[in-house]
Image (tube, grey):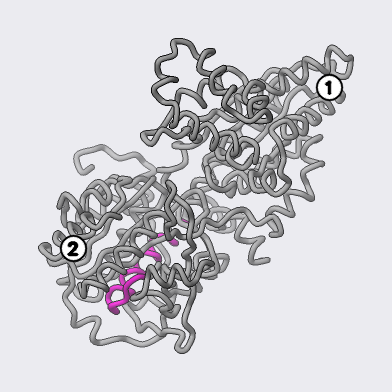
C-alpha cells in the first residue's frame, strides 16, 4: 500500500482519531469479574458443559478504574487473525489492539497471521509495526493481513496450531470473526486448557449480517457501515424509480441466516415491500403465498397508475420458506443417493423428471412450479459436499418469474390492467469492505483496545464486549463475555456440534414492529427516504449515529 497513491478521502480519514471509551482511555485497566455469578449456555446446557469442561461457566467481566501494575510489567507477544468474510472496521480493530499493547509496554509485539486461520496452520505471519498500521487506520477491507475461511477444528489442526504458536512464542491469540470463527476460538481455548498450554484466546465479534448479537454483544462490527452503504444505493434507486415511474426494482441484500440487513435498510429507506425471512418462517408461508402478497401490492399500485416500486429481498429468504427448506433437504438426499444415475443423464429435463418421481407429491408439485432457471440451479449448482448452494439462488428472479405468471392469469381474468417491468439487483460485496463509518471506526478501535486489556490480564475464552452503543463513544462500557455462554448445540452435516447461536430478527422487537406499523402505508405511497453517503462529513448528529435497529432496541 505504501507505493500506492491514495485518494483524497483516504488522506482525510487517516487524520480521524477514534474516540475511546473513558474507562480504557488512560491505558489498560483492572478487570472485575461478576463474582459468584457463573454463566451458562443459551440452551443444551449439559451437553455444552460436557464439551467445555474446562471453560464452561466463567463469569462475565467488566473493566473498572485503576491500574494493574502487573500488566505494564509484562512483555508479551500477541497474534491476530482475520477469519471469514470481510467487514468494515477490521483494520481499526487491529489498530486498537496494537495501540493498547504498545501503551502498556513499548516492547510488546503484535504478529499478524496471513490469509486467515490457514496462516496459523502454515506458519505464515508478519509483525504489525507502527509504520504498517498507520497506512490502514480507518480504512475498509482486511488487506493488511488478508482473511480466509479455513476452520481449525480437527485434532491434527489443534496440534499444529499449538506447535506453531509455541514455536513463535505467542502469548495470546485474538480471533476477529463471526459466530463460526468464534466457535472455533472457544474449541481452541478448551483444547489449550486441557493441554495446559498457557496461551490466551480472545474473540472479536465481526459480521455485516448482524446475527452475532446477544445481551453482551449489542452489535457485530461492520453492520453499521454495510447497511449505510446499501441504504445509500437503495435510496438512489428509490429516487430513480420515483423519477422514471416505470420499473419495479427487486433488490436482494446480503444475510443468508437472518434478515437484519434487509430490516435495517428497509427502515432507513422505506420502500414499498420489505420481505423478512423470520416472518415467513413464523407464519409458515408458502412460496405461492409470498408471491400472492407481492402481486396484490403490484395490482393495487397499478390501479393507482403506479406501475413501479421497490422490493427488498433477504438473501436467505428461500431457506425460511418451510416447503422450500423441505424441498432442498429432500433434493440433497435424492441427489446424494442417486448421484451416478443422475450424472449419466444428458438433459436437465431428464434429471428433473427423475427427481420429481422420487419426491413426495407435494414437493414434486412445487418443483414443477418453479421457473426453469431456478430448478436448474437446484439440480446442477452443488457445493463440494453435494448440497444445493442456496446462497447462489437468485431469489429475486424466482419471485419475478412467478409474479409474471400470476399477473398474466389476472390479466386474462380482467383483474389487472397494468404493466410490469422488473429490474433486479444484488447488493453484497459492495458493502463488505467500505471505509468504516464514524461509528464503526470508533467501535472497532474500542473492540481492539478492549481485547488487548483482556489478554494483558490473562483472560481466555472471552469475546470482546463493548456496550451502551447508543451513547457517545466515551461513555461506552467495556468488558468480556465468555464464549461458552453463547453456545448451543446444532446438527451440522449429520453431527451434533457446539455453535454460537445466531441471532434472528426478533418479531416482537420494536424494529420489526415499526416495519409492521408502516408497511401498508409504504406499500401504496412513495414515502421513500434517501440516506445518501452519510458515513463521514457533516454534523455529528448525522455522521456519528448508529443503526435504527439499536436505537429501537434500546428505546433511545
Badge 1: residue crowd in 10 Å (few <14, some 14–19, many ≥20)? few
- Residue 441, labelled with which disc? none
Binning the other alpha carbons within 10 Å of mark 2 as few (below 14), some (14 to 19) or many (20 upward) gives: many
Q: In this view, does 362 lie to the left or right of 490?
A: right
Give the side of residue 44 with respect to residue 161, left or right: right
Q: Which image quadrant: the N terminus?
A: top left
Magenta stretch containing residue 115, yes or no? no
As helix, strand or loop, the secondary structure at mark 2 comes to helix
109 to 398, vertically: above or below: below
Distance between the Cα atoms at labels 2 and 1?
67 Å
Residue at point 61%, 35% (across, down): 324
The residue nearer to you, when weighing 65 against 192, is 192
* Observer-nearest of 327 and 187: 327
Residue at 37%, 70% (x, y): give it: 52
Would you say residue 102 is visible in this rendering? no
- Location of residue 21 in the rendering, given as x and y in whole percent from the top left corner: 44, 72
Q: Is mark 1 on a helix, strand or loop?
A: loop
Along the viewing direction, whichever of 273 and 10 lies nearer the viewer: 273
Which label's residue is closer to the chain start, 2 or 1? 2
Magenta region: which residues?
440-461
- The residue at which mark 1 appears reads as 305
Q: Where is residue 166 in the image (x, y as percent from the top left)?
A: 14, 66
Q: Is residue 490 above or below residue 409?
A: below
**Residue 119 as seen in the image, left or right of residue 339:** left
Q: Which of marks 2 and 1 is in front?
A: 2
The correct choice, above or below, for 38 with respect to 510 in the image is below
Residue 250 % position (x, y): 63, 29
Q: Which residue is drawn at 45% across and 68% down?
A: 47
**Residue for badge 2:** 162
Note whether residue 508 is visible.
yes
Amino acid at each position: 500500500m505504501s507505493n500506492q497513491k491514495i485518494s483524497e478521502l483516504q488522506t482525510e480519514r487517516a487524520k480521524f482519531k477514534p474516540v475511546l471509551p473513558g474507562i480504557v482511555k488512560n491505558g489498560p485497566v483492572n478487570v472485575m469479574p461478576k463474582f459468584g455469578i457463573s454463566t451458562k449456555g443459551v440452551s443444551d446446557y449439559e451437553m455444552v458443559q460436557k464439551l467445555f469442561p474446562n471453560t464452561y461457566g466463567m463469569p462475565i467481566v467488566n473493566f473498572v478504574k485503576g491500574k494493574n501494575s502487573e500488566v505494564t510489567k509484562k512483555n508479551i507477544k500477541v497474534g491476530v487473525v482475520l477469519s471469514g468474510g470481510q467487514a468494515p472496521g477490521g483494520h481499526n480493530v487491529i489498530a486498537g489492539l496494537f495501540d493498547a499493547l504498545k501503551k502498556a509496554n513499548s516492547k510488546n509485539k503484535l504478529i499478524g497471521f496471513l490469509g486467515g486461520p490457514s496462516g496459523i496452520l502454515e506458519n505464515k505471519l508478519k509483525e504489525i509495526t507502527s509504520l504498517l498500521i498507520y497506512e490502514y487506520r480507518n480504512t475498509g477491507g482486511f488487506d493488511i493481513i488478508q482473511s480466509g475461511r479455513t476452520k481449525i477444528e480437527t485434532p491434527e489442526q489443534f496440534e499444529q496450531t499449538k506447535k506453531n504458536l509455541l514455536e513463535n512464542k505467542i502469548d495470546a491469540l485474538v480471533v476477529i470473526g463471526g459466530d463460526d470463527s468464534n466457535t472455533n476460538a472457544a474449541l481452541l481455548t478448551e483444547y489449550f486448557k486441557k493441554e495446559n498450554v498457557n496461551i490466551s484466546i480472545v474473540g472479536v465479534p465481526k459480521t455485516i449480517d448482524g446475527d452475532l448479537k446477544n445481551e453482551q454483544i449489542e452489535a457485530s462490527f461492520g453492520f453499521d457501515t454495510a447497511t449505510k452503504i446499501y441504504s445509500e444505493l437503495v435510496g438512489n434507486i428509490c429516487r430513480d424509480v420515483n423519477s422514471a415511474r416505470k420499473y419495479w426494482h427487486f433488490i436482494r441484500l446480503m444475510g443468508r441466516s437472518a434478515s437484519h440487513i434487509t430490516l435495517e435498510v428497509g427502515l432507513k429507506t422505506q420502500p414499498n415491500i420489505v420481505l423478512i425471512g423470520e416472518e415467513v418462517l413464523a407464519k409458515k408461508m408458502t412460496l405461492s403465498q409470498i408471491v400472492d402478497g407481492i402481486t396484490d401490492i403490484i395490482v393495487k399500485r397499478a390501479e393507482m397508475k403506479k406501475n413501479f416500486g421497490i422490493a427488498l429481498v433477504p438473501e436467505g429468504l428461500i431457506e425460511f420458506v418451510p416447503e422450500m427448506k423441505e424441498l432442498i433437504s429432500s433434493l440433497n438426499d435424492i441427489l446424494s443417493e442417486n448421484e451416478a444415475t443422475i450424472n449419466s443423464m444428458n438433459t436437465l429435463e431428464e434429471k428433473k423428471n427423475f427427481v420429481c418421481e422420487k419426491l413426495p407429491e407435494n414437493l414434486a408439485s412445487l418443483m414443477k412450479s418453479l421457473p426453469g432457471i431456478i430448478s436448474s440451479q437446484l439440480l446442477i449448482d452443488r457445493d463440494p459436499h453435494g448440497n444445493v448452494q442456496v446462497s447462489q439462488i437468485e431469489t429475486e428472479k424466482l419471485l419475478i418469474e412467478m409474479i409474471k405468471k400470476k399477473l398474466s392469469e389476472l390479466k386474462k381474468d380482467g383483474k389487472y390492467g397494468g404493466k410490469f417491468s422488473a429490474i433486479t439487483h444484488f447488493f453484497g460485496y459492495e458493502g463488505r469492505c467500505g471505509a468504516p463509518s464514524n461509528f464503526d471506526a470508533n467501535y472497532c478501535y474500542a473492540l481492539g483496545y478492549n481485547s488487548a486489556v483482556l489478554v494483558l490480564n490473562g483472560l481466555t475464552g472471552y469475546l470482546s464486549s463493548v456496550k451502551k452503543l447508543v451513547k457517545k463513544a466515551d461513555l461506552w462500557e467495556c468488558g468480556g463475555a465468555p464464549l461458552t455462554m453463547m453456545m448451543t448445540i446444532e446438527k451440522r452435516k449429520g453431527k451434533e456440534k457446539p455453535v454460537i447461536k445466531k441471532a434472528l430478527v426478533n418479531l416482537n422487537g420494536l424494529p420489526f414492529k415499526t416495519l409492521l406499523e408502516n408497511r401498508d402505508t409504504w406499500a401504496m405511497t412513495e414515502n421513500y427516504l434517501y440516506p445518501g453517503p452519510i458515513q463521514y462529513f457533516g454534523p455529528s448528529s448525522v455522521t456519528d449515529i448508529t443503526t435504527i435497529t439499536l436505537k429501537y432496541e434500546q428505546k433511545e
